[in-house]
Image (cartoon, rainbow, N blue to C red):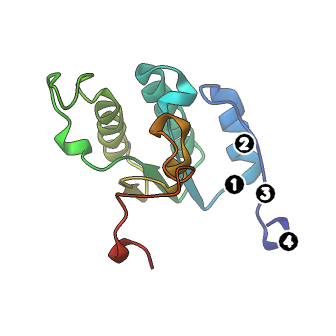
Amino acid sequence: LISKGVIPVSFAYGDKLSIERALEISTPKLLVVITASQIAKTLEKEVVHGKIILDAAKAANVPHVILTSTELADDAPTQRTIFAPTGADHLHAKKELEEYIKGLGLPCYSILRSASFFENFSDHSLKNPLFRGRLSDLYEGWVQ
C-alpha cells in the first residue's frame, strides 16, 4: 500500500491529540470512521470517540468522511422489549453519530449502514457457526 501512496498511521481511540496528529501526517482524501462499543467499552464512550474523530476530520479538512453505522439505526426501539432487552442501545449510539455527522458541516460525507460483516460468522459470541460447519442465515442470492 505504501507504494500506492498510502501512509499508515496509528492513533488511540478517544485520544484527540493522537487522532489529530495521524490526520496531519496522512492528509487523507477519504476517511472511514468505524466506532465500536467493544473498543470503547461503553456505548457512551463509543459516541464520544466517534465525535472526537469526526471533529478532527473536520478540522483537518478531510474531503470525504464515511461513517460506518448499522442497519435499523432509524428504527432503534425507545423501550426495552423481549426482542431488544437492552433497548437496542447500540442502535442509539450509531443514530447519535449519524445525526452528529449530518450537522457537522463537512464538505462531503457518507453513512454506510452495513447489516453485518462476514467476520461475525466466526465470532465466538455468536456460537461460531463457521466452526460448526454450517451457516443457516446466508442465502444463495446474498453471496456472489
Q: Is residue 43 placed above or below 54 in the rendered structure?
A: above
**Disc assigned to residue 7:** 3
Image-based side of 122 in relation to 97, left or right: right
| Three-letter code for the amino acid on which mark 2 is drawn | Ala
Is disc 1 surrounded by few (<14), some (14 to 19) or many (20+) residues within 10 Å?
some
Measured as percent of width and height from the top left, residue 42 is found at 46, 20
Instruction: Give the CA distance from mark 1 to mark 2.
Output: 8 Å
**Mark earlier in primary sequence (2, 4):** 4
Q: Label for residue 3?
A: 4
Q: Specify which label sits upstream in the sequence, 3 or 1.
A: 3
Amino acid type at circle 4 is Ser
User: Callout 1: helix, strand or loop?
Assistant: loop
Q: Position of residue 106 (x, y in %)?
A: 42, 51
Spatial separation of the CA atoms under disc 3 and disc 1:
9 Å
Q: Is residue 117 above or below residue 86?
A: below
> Dot 1 corresponds to which residue?
27
